[in-house]
Image: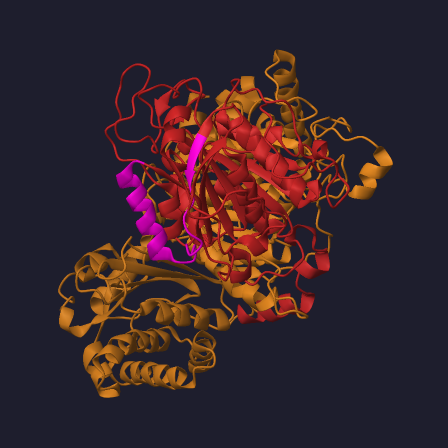
Chain colours: A orange, B red
Amino acid sequence: MSNATLTARVADAEIGRRPEEIVNDFSIQVATVNGSGSQSANSVLMRSIFLMGVPVSGKNIFPSNIAGLPTWFTIRANKDGYTARRKEVDICIAMNPETAREDVLKARPGAAIIYEESFNLSSLRSDVFFYPVPFAKLAAQATTEPKLRKLLVNMIYVGVASHLLGVGRDEVVAAIQKQFKSKAKAVDLNIKAVDLGIDYARAQLLKKDPFQIQRMNKTADKIIIDGNSAAALGAMFGGCTVVTWYPITPSSSLCETMIEYFSQYRIDPKTGKATFAIVQAEDELAALGMVIGAGWAGARAMTATSGPGLSLMAEFAGLAYFTEIPAVVWDIQRVGPSTGLPTRTSQGDVTAAFYLSHGDTKHIILLPGSVKECFEFAGAALDLAERFQTIVFVLSDLDLGMNNWMSDRFDYPRKPLDRGKVLSKEDLERLGKFERYLDVDGDGIPFRTLPGTPHPLAAYFTRGSGHNERAGYSERPEDYQNLVDRLARKHETAKQFIPKPVIDIQPQASVGIIAYGTTDWAILESRDQLRNEKKIETSYLRLRSLPFTGDVAEFVTRHERVYVVEQNRDGQLADLIRLEVGPHSPRIRKVLHYSGLPIDARTVTEMIAAAETAARKEQ
Amino acid sequence: MSSAPSSGGVLKANRLGLPMAEYKGLDSTLCAGCGHDGITSQIVKAFFEYGVEPYRVAKFSGIGCSSKTPAYFIGNSHGFNAVHGRMPAVATGAMLANRTLLSIGVSGDGDTASIGIGQFVHLLRRNIPLIYIIENNGVYGLTKGQFSATADVGSKLKNGIVNELPPIDCCVLGIELGCSYVARSFAGDPKQLVPLIKGAIAHKGTALLDVISPCVTFNNHEGSTKSFKYAKEHEELLHEIGFVPFFEQIQTDYPEGTVKEVELHDGSHLRMRKLDRDYDPTNKPQALQLIRKSHEDGELLTGLLFYDGEKKDFIEEINMIEEPLATLPDERVRPSEQALNEIMEEFR
């Protein structure tokens, strides 16, 4: 939007005339108090827009607190399918007296402000549209129960907002039915509250702001899901059998969702017994220890954690690497170091995870960028762990894991599970020989046997201390070097198996962008902004795993400047890429966003545009 | 390795037709005369006499002298020497993956009660099917003689430092936290230890054996309360009543309620006092009371201290199927396409 139209709109607001319509392209921010039960209402509002066929995303900006502190839920509706966070607030629903003034002041000029009448906010600004609503009074009409009243207030603002935005009542009702499923009483009560809001808005509020939802057909085959649920489902359909976890935000919901779905879909029909074990461990050390024990004994095992848990897992990570035991760790990254900001998002664990443990270690890392990839990589991680007999990390983040993302439906996995190189009793009989750490195939991956294999050749001794090819204890210099060199070879082999980067080369572009994970959503939008507004054409490589394949170096050498965009202070991935591309490292530029809020396109666009202007001046 | 005295007639082969040699492992690299080697011998003997298929056994340990010993018994079984103090988690995971394994973990007092106390207590709480042997010498051998958390008040290191901190009694912890088989014994007492290990093999939940195992190098001197001399003078034995049906063979050669001198493998004599037949190892308060009294008397109370044969183990508790999870075929661990469609519909 140009400055001229913005000024015009502000002027319109001031004189009370209706500006030109903005259809299916805005963000809503609902400000409430944590623990007030607004989550269902916000989901209903988001889903009702989704049911109108308009692409949406929903992000919860919440405190590390059970009740009482401020929380914000942002919904972005965008006809072009941009669902990254948008910095500007177009519609502000101010329900929290603590933050209401600040919320109003932060909204962009021309914004619509729906608020509790008694907050008296209308004198704060003259360049926004105010919609005062006596929420408390309306709720009191609907029920005499004080506790219920509080909850109904939330659904009343859904009614008011849906009316002002032009979201159909049918869609809101359908969203409520979805939210409360078979609880008929809750459905009725919530519809009643929504109608109170609609009726009030219809009778008392004159629509003056430009924001509109109009029906589209862009969500017909889509789903809305959070990344943790997607990962849980992916693991279930990926044949995961042992899950251990220790509660930590933002990863807990991954394992809790697993409990929910495994209890439904992974019960043996004949015996009524579980084909899985899910154990809440005493800490993250134990969680990974159990995964390693299970992986050693042949299970497809995983755990999920976040930064502090990852730190605790360092010693065991080295054990899994050195003894070659399959294990999968999901790290739903949050802001660190230390406790950091437990409820805010980050991509700050890349270096830590890649090298986790003392000594020479490097791991396979998967970097899902979408909920669909969370689903797919959950199975892939288990396959890779068994194929490479090693620990595999999957780095998601709070934004991906806990927020709501629109996605295509997940595809049913048809590839058989990859159980890796495991020798059975029959194999041993046939081979007449077994050496646990011998590189038989030249790919760095040895064969293993599972405990319980009824053959005298099967047994071997696993130890985190030095060992030779026959798994015997060894401190011999040549045995140690032989072992760690083979581990490095195995790491090389992995490059052929891990998810390849997604690359979009624009032949005339001298500028490249590298990003990964949730940053992708901002890049998708930013590349269009750079092209349309700044006349900067870009190529793009979205990294989906580590170690680097040759594609990364090739991409870097094709472009004069490569902006590595990520959500941490130090540019962790950029540094890894610099090591990888050696002499070409001066081409690497860092574009960093690390406030704890999800990265937005505008920030990326402005930073790259400014850097490009400077770089072109130099030339 | 010191040779254990036999408990009865010498078997050439067990019920599986396997000789004792099948239950041995590599040669020990521990100090000559180490109590741990005695325990290894009793493990070999117990598994041999019981007739366990070697391939069914999974051996676990953490780090330390004790944790080296799984390499020294049942060579034809899988073993896992994990990280310091974290063996319980690794063993737990393995049992989840394959519940048909017979698991034995060997740990030390440092590995269990110092660095490993966190995982140890949760192992006990869960009642994971695992034989857990603590080779308890109250000292760190591998790092050359520092105190562990089981060192008694007043015990003295070679350099003269005296321990003033109270020791952790792992058996008391076990009884308090729901472990269903809790025993204490002495490395130099095969007659007691072999049947206790056999009982542990037969038991379905966690079987905890706290075995006092003097360190010949760092803790076997006058000032130590876990020296051979001290242990032999202060050991008080419980008779293993109520526990007989779980053994295939129990050799007892002295009557209840009497005191007997027993010759140990190194030729010395141990004064054992057997409690009367009416000692009931299922009586939790009584067990705790007797242990406390033994602390007050400066004695080692040995034998099966507590037993609960009814308690569900963790595998039963979480309702796992009978087959090992590890080897379930794809179709049993991947729900149908229809299931995915059903779930996708929920997210519409």
Of residue A567 and residue A82, the one placed in the foreground of this image is A567
Q: Residue at x 64, y 41 (%)?
A: B47
Q: A528 left or right of A94?
A: right
The residue closer to the viewer here, A110 or B23, is B23
Dividing the picture into quarters, in which one does residue A235 lie?
bottom right
Residue A40 horizontal side relative to residue A560, left or right: left
Residue A500 visible, this orientation:
no
Residue B27, located in which quarter of the rendered image?
top right
Q: Position of residue A356 (x, y in %)?
A: 48, 31
The stretch of residues the image draws in magenta is B270-298
Tag count in the figure? 0
> In the image, is A388 to the left or to the right of B279?
right
Would residue B342 be counted in the magenta stretch?
Answer: no
The residue positioned farthest toward the right in the image shown: A430
| Residue A58 image offset from top left, x and y in percent | 41, 61
How far across and how far down the image is residue A225, in percent? 50, 62
Which quarter of the picture shows residue A72? bottom left
As drawn, A436 above or below A504: above
Relative to A492, is A7 above or below? Answer: below
Q: Is residue B289 magenta?
A: yes
